[in-house]
Amino acid sequence: MVVQAVKWIGDIDGYLELVDQRRLPGEFVSLQCRDTRFLFDAIKTLAVRGAPAIGVAAAYGLALALQESKAGDSPEKALAELTKAREYLASSRPTAVNLFWALDRMRRKAEGFVEGEAGATVTALREAVLAEAKAIHSEDVEMCRQIGLHGEKFIKEGAGILTHCNAGALATGGQGTALSPMFEAHKKGRKFSVYADETRPLLQGARLTAWELKQAGIQVAVICDNMAGWLMKQGKINAVITGADRIAANGDAANKIGTYSVSILAREHGVPFYIAAPSSTFDLSIASGAEIPIEQRAAEEVTSFAGTRTVPAGVSVWNPAFDVTEARNIAAIITERGVIENPDTEIISQCLAPSSRGS
Amino acid sequence: MVVQAVKWIGDIDGYLELVDQRRLPGEFVSLQCRDTRFLFDAIKTLAVRGAPAIGVAAAYGLALALQESKAGDSPEKALAELTKAREYLASSRPTAVNLFWALDRMRRKAEGFVEGEAGATVTALREAVLAEAKAIHSEDVEMCRQIGLHGEKFIKEGAGILTHCNAGALATGGQGTALSPMFEAHKKGRKFSVYADETRPLLQGARLTAWELKQAGIQVAVICDNMAGWLMKQGKINAVITGADRIAANGDAANKIGTYSVSILAREHGVPFYIAAPSSTFDLSIASGAEIPIEQRAAEEVTSFAGTRTVPAGVSVWNPAFDVTEARNIAAIITERGVIENPDTEIISQCLAPSSRGS
């Protein structure tokens, strides 16, 4: 069964349930978020992670904010509280685009409701807010499913599929992006094996991808990142599928560090390399990947593990969070709107035009 | 200062001192080996590792064996004890070629001494055995130094050098193989930076290479293995130097898993890739790397770290210890006899012919 990382339980007095990803794979623990402070901490400490999953969770967070409301019968006061909660939750992960997007959409909905409905009650506002959060969630579920339906054809019977990091159900409101084609192919009864790069330094591949594929009954093996090339050389990999964090107008795709190397190794071995990501991942304001800034993360992620030091004190570390895979190494980008093969600036702008659908 | 992994302290009543590599980089502890049982455990549990270092340590082990002797005044009895100790130490790492080589050379020396010298005393035998161990050790020191002298020209002023795993002073009796050119370039006052792949799963690069380069005052930074390609893309790497465990007649080289990927990434970025290894690493009985068997190691190396599980229970792991880098991706093999550029079967057989010396 495909795990569900984010769930709303009950009606407007209900709560948000999250899979605690900090404790995987050792323990499977569900968190019940009943207030915004708890949710803030869950986002900040990566109990919930993955841009789409964070966006969905934060949207539900505004429904929680209205449960805490001291506004009495005043929708205007409730709206002011919601706006304040929006600011608060937005500060939990300062660079998470989906987080801001979801919170802004929720605020606009709430504002529109209060301004538009004469005699609106706080209860009706709460219903409207929860409905909007559910809409964001179900759109995310559908987006994931469409990526899966468009991408499953790339997973042939008996294939070996390599993935890097975690772009699965744990990272979204639905069944993931990179893993979604695998879930769809599995649903169709196709047999295949997935190899999950462990994905240093934070091991999302070992801890999360392997866990959720196993939950779903899909054959999975973990490898260290440095084994991917040799695995391809043995002929065991027929396709690579990863997610993306941001895609430039020409198709260059930023994703977890290590993706770039995998794309080079895939080309060397004649293995097609696919990116699976929603169309919202495209940032057409940047012409190429050269314009994507790469965040450097804390040295401690590399220098110690589970409290044991692995790098001598005083030795420096280079720890970029992402790298950029060039469009020329990408066989196709699988989106919810269709598949963009051999991506370049022209075909991407055609496929993403409002009236168009991909192939 | 370059660390010395293996040292004999004192005369024939002395002892063997080893750097305890299990505890690096957290603690720098020297082990005093005063008997063969202690040394056996040190080899078996990787307190001393690296094929040449194990060979040298085991040679000294036979000097320790004679300290334990109950043979009284009988050189023949002492020789029988030495032969037994040889068997015992040889069983500590069943696949270590240098270990067998060093132990056999020691046994032949001891046998020749007892047979050749009429009226030989046990004390004279002990002196001959210690002298042979010291000869093996100093040949190893000189081999390392010659590799460094031949290879240092590949490290230019201001260069960035990538290495994988640990083929340094900690792995040999001398100043290492892959790291030796770095020590020689540093001695000449050249400034350069080394990037050490952390080298999953056992992190020899992070734990050992970074530690010994820092000890020697050489600028070093650790990266996760999956960052090497992106680092090259940033133009930060001018050469790659690694060791090798076994080199086929055509120049294909087996080395720590991950080396193959690094060689592909280096070629993609126009970065020369060098192997540094003694000529004894060549196995001319195998035509190409395809004939080199690749050991699969225990899943536990990948599935947990410092007692914390990183891979879900029940998920399988692929954990080859080595991979094979094709000769066509190797710019040169640096040996103690000289540099073999663009290695292939013909040039290797010429360079390794008894009468010949490399360039």
Image (tube, coloured by chain):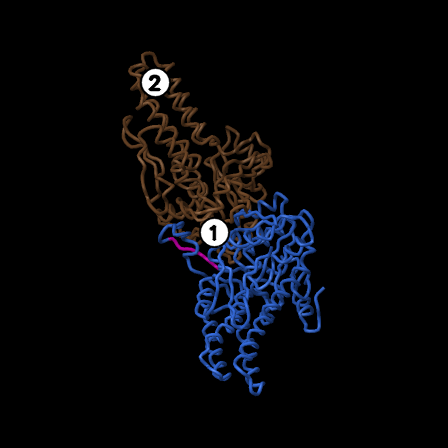
Chain colours: A brown, B blue
In the rendered view, would you say B11 is above or below B194? below
- Pinpoint the chain carrying mark 2: A
Q: Secondary structure at mark 1?
A: loop
Viewer-closest of A176 and B31: B31
Residue B234: x, y in percent?
A: 61, 43
In the picture, measured across the screen, residue B191 lies left or right of residue B301, that is right
At 57% across and 79% down in the image, what residue appears? B109
**Quarter of the figure that contains the N terminus of chain A:** top left
Quadrant in which residue A125 is drawn: top left
In the image: residue B189, left or right of residue A133: right
Q: Kindly give the residue lying farthest to the bottom in the view shown.
A: B118
Q: Which residues are magenta?
A: B315-320
Type of amino acid under label 2: Ala
Which labelled disc corresponds to residue B270? none
Q: In the image, residue B290 lies at what x, y percent?
A: 55, 65
Vertical order, B75 against B25 (above or below) = below
Q: Residue A85 or B204: which is nearer the viewer?
A: B204
Q: Is residue A190 left or right of residue A357?
A: left
Task: Out of B50 and A312, give the one closest to the viewer.
Answer: A312
> Regarding mark 2 in the picture, which secondary structure is present there?
helix
Q: Residue furthest right?
A: B359
Q: Amino acid at mark 1?
A: Gly
Dominant secondary-structure state across the stretch colored magenta = loop
Where residue A270 appears, as percent x and y from the top left, is 56, 52
Mark 2 to mark 1 CA distance (whole Å) = 55 Å
**Label ID, residue B26:** 1
Is-magenta flag for residue A338? no
Q: Nearer the viewer, mark 2 or mark 1?
A: 1
For label 2, the residue is A78
Badge 1 sits on which subunit?
A: B
Q: Is residue B183 above or below residue A205?
A: below
Furthest-top residue in this view: A118
